[in-house]
Amino acid sequence: MDDKTNKYTYCYDCFRWLQTYPEAILAHQAIFQYDEVFSEWLSRLKYHGDVRLAKIMVDTLSEIYLQYEDYAWIILPSSPESIHERGFHSTAILLMEAGIAFSEPFDYIGDGRKQAKKARDERIQLGQSFQIKSDFVFNQSKYLIFDDVYTTGATLLQAKNLLRLALIAGESDALVESLTLAHHQMLD
């Protein structure tokens, strides 16, 4: 891409995603870099069910919320198997602890396999995992999709594109961005 026509600096993932998705949906921010400490915290929260650990992110999420308070916050659905296994939605519990209102406009239609169990190429080739709920009302001008970890971006970008297409169909030019707690660079 010609630097004179592009006003953004992209990470390697975003540069690759530009070949698939329009620039308008790449806007993303990760709060932390994924490291061993974050991995342990997330594992204990999500896979060991220690929901008390959600409190650790309250101050951080409350501070970040100030940057995005005029956005409608959205979470991605987990598979019914994951919800049944854990007994809670890990991203929802984080936002509830921080007192941040959110909605879940998507239904899960994926294959049920956990993203953490998939290799990078499996994630990239993933078919659409979501559909917009028939009763969801688009009445905002800014949407922020919140998730725990950006690994390849595949799931997040599918959701953002689906939301963008629904907004376009509804003749809305709403802004769609994303935010994750961490960015985990998954090597090829």
Image (cartoon, rainbow, N blue to C red):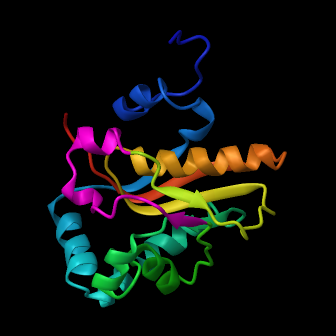
Q: Which of the image's four quarters has the C terminus? A: top left
Find out whether residue 116 is within the magenta segment: yes
Q: Nearer the viewer, residue 59 or 94?
A: 94
The answer to whether 83 is drawn above or below residue 143 in the figure is: below
The answer to whether 178 is drawn above or below residue 15 in the figure is: below
Residue at horizontal 25%, vertical 88%? 50
Give percent across and percent down for residue 59: 45, 77
Q: Is residue 140 left or right of residue 75?
A: right
Quarter assignment of residue 57: bottom left
Find out whether residue 156 is within the magenta segment: no
Q: Is residue 78 left or right of residue 138?
A: left
Residue at horizontal 49%, vertical 27%? 18
The answer to whether 93 is drawn above or below residue 149 in the figure is: below
Could you tell me how many numbered marks the image carries?
Answer: 0
Residue at horizontal 42%, vertical 53%? 30
Quarter assignment of residue 180: bottom left
Give percent across and percent down for residue 29: 48, 50
Residue at horizontal 35%, vertical 29%? 12
The answer to whether 18 is drawn above or below residue 147 in the figure is: above
The residue range painted magenta reads 106-126
Q: Nearer the viewer, residue 157 or 56?
A: 157
Give percent across and percent down for residue 119: 20, 46
Give percent across and percent down for residue 82: 32, 75
Q: Is residue 63 left or right of residue 149?
A: right
Quarter assignment of residue 52: bottom left
